[in-house]
Image (cartoon, helix red, strand yellow):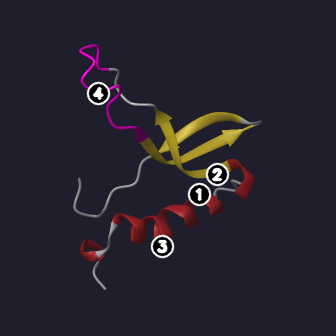
């Protein structure tokens, strides 16, 4: 299968997660699909907040977030 045909989730499963683990990050230090914002506040009152934003991976060191890893499918530069 050509890499260009893989979805973002397939890229994460086949390439990114193994790379993070081979860099010696332990499972308790890796969290996936982490909410990083509650969404933009709309002062006009029409909607309480915009869409939440998620990080594909957040890496923690001593329970403190240290890095965010954003995955993309193979069609992005």
Residues packed near mark 2 inside 10 Å, few (<14), some (14 to 19) or many (20 plus): some
- In this rendering, the answer to whether 27 lies above or below 59 is below
Q: Residue furthest bottom?
A: 1
Residue at which label 2 appears: 30
Residue 34, disc:
none
Q: Circle 4 sits in a helix, a strand or a loop, which is it?
A: loop
Depth check, front residue: 2 or 10:
10
Q: Could you say where residue 11 lies in the image, as x and y percent from the top left?
A: 40, 67
Mark 3 vs mark 4: in front: 4
Q: N-terminal of the two: label 3 or label 4?
A: 3
Any mark on residue 47, and which? 4
Residue that appears at 67% across and 41% down: 60
Circle nearer the N terminus (4, 1): 1
Q: Nearer the viewer, residue 19 or 40?
A: 40
Q: Nearer the viewer, residue 22 or 26?
A: 26
Query: Which residue carries the number 1 mark?
Result: 20
Q: Which residue is mark 3?
A: 14
Residue 45 in the magenta stretch? The answer is: yes
Disc 3 to disc 1, C-alpha distance: 11 Å
Q: Is residue 42 above or below residue 8?
A: above
Judged by its main secondary structure, the magenta piece is: loop
Q: Indicate which label's residue lies in the foreground, 4 or 1.
A: 4
- Decide which of tag 2 and tag 1 comes sooner along the chain: 1
* Residue farthest toward the top in the current orientation of the protein: 43
Q: Is residue 38 above or below residue 34?
A: above
> How many numbered callouts?
4
Where is residue 22, by image quadrant? bottom right
Label 1 SS: helix
Q: Secondary structure at mark 2?
A: strand
The stretch of residues the image draws in magenta is 42-53
- Callout 2 touching callout 1 (CB < 8 Å): yes
Q: Quadrant of the N terminus?
A: bottom left
């Amino acid at each position: 299968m050509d890499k260009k045909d893989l979805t973002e989730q397939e890229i994460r499963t086949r390439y990114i997660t193994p790379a993070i683990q081979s860099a010696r990050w332990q499972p308790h230090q890796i969290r996936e699909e982490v909410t990083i914002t509650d969404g933009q506040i709309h002062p006009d009152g029409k909607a309480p907040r915009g869409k939440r934003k998620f990080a594909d991976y957040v890496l923690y060191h001593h329970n403190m977030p240290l890095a965010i890893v954003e995955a993309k499918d193979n069609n992005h530069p």
